[in-house]
Image: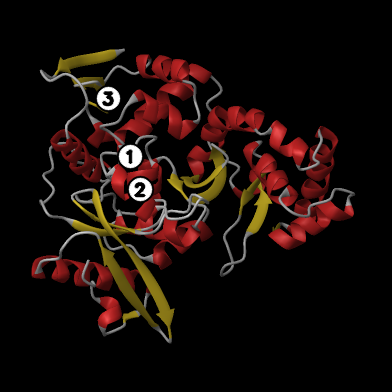
Amino acid sequence: MVRASSTGRQTGPVSTAHLREVAVARTAAQRISVAGEPTVTATTRAMLGTQAQDLAAATWALALRTPGADAAAVQAALADRSVVRGWPARGTLFLVAADDLRWLTQLLAPRSLAASTGLWRRAGLEPQHFSLAEEAVVAALAEHGELSRPDLLGAVARHGVDTAGERGSHLLRWLSARCVIVFAAPRGTQQRFALFEEWIPGSRRIDDREEALAEYVRRWLARRGPATVRDLAWWGGLTLTEARHAVSLVDDVETTVVGDATWIERADAGAEGAGGGNARQARPARGDLRLLPPFDELLLGYGAREASLDPAGASRLVPASNGLFLPAVTVDGRVVGTWRRTVARGTVAVEVDPWVAWTERRRAQVRRRAEQYAQHLGLALAEGPASAPTSP
């Protein structure tokens, strides 16, 4: 049930000024601009899911939201199995708290799998191939405990299923979305897999779908608001009808109508994380500059991204047709440039491509954030022009 509603006076499209306020509020909700949870595991749980097709990017996304955390802390959470990687929604990889992966996957993955049947057939995969692959994978992992991706797909191939091209990825995603397998802790850059019930047997079940939908709304909205019902539906791959119904199951959702947009938020979102404190009451410092990873939830957490990304800059952030996002420089939650890193000989250089003119204050902020990123990697920040912002 929606508990409260307020209506703005303006009509028509949402103003740029209001979108800027939404961007600032989201940086607080996501604990980018205010203090977050005390551990990587708590941050992962609070975020519900952090997009992770690029594991190094997802590692930085979690660390920058967790005071004092670095890449090693995220790797430790993966190793102790409190954080895991899987395909719970939209056919996309996420980092998820181990306790949440089962119920979230069982709630959201089936619709994504159903939508992929045509893709699989075009790749030459029929139902019997998935069954054979499951037999091979269960047997191989029962014997070895963990296997690398090549070794696991090799076992499938020996069982008579062609894994060439994209077929191997399709099979692994299907097995993950059915909670048969899960990513084990990586070894360097090597992907490894284990049986779901062996790696995280205590992952929570929520067998009642309405209960699971309500949990999804509570948890997602606590770290994404202000958002829209369309954003909620998009992130989980729900229909709009189901998303609206899901919102109606939660008592403390507040709505605000501004122009043509209806925004939803949790009234007590601060209670959803281990860090305590309500981000809506916290006041992030204005002018807050951040170096965000590609695919960060500040952008990819929403179906519509105008609050953080001027549509005119979309082609600069996603310059290719493959949908790959560049790392973003943001100020108050709005993208103002991109950045890239170069790792060599124990150092990392950070080079920024600004879309706006930099002040000396901005240059100093970029330097501090670059140093923070270097510390995250456990490397020294390379000196010289590559670690300073260039002119727009």
Q: Please report contact status of discs 2 and 1: CB closer than 8 Å, yes or no.
A: yes
Identify the secondary structure beneath mark 2: helix
Residue that appears at 45% across and 23% down: 213
Q: Give x and y (percent) for residue 390.
A: 24, 72
Name the front one of labels 2 and 1: 2
Asked whether the beta carbons under mark 3 and mark 1 sit within 8 Å of each other, the answer is no
Give me the C-alpha separation between circle 2 and circle 1. Answer: 9 Å
Is residue 190 toward the left or the right of residue 69 in the image? right
Residue 380 placement: quadrant: bottom left
According to the image, what is the colour scheme of the structure? Answer: secondary structure
Dot 3 falls on a residue whose secondary structure is strand
Q: How many marks?
A: 3
The percent coordinates of residue 199 (x first, y second) are: 62, 50
Q: Residue at x 64, y 39 (%)?
A: 179
- Please give the name of the residue rendered at 22% of the width and 41% of the height, measured from the top-left corner: 23
Q: Position of residue 22 (x, y in %)?
A: 20, 36
* Residue kind at label 3, given as amino acid type: Ile
Q: Is residue 188 left or right of residue 15?
A: right
- Per the image, the residue denoted by label 2 is 314
Instruction: Specify which label sits upstream in the sequence, 2 or 1.
Output: 1
Q: Which residue is mark 1?
A: 305
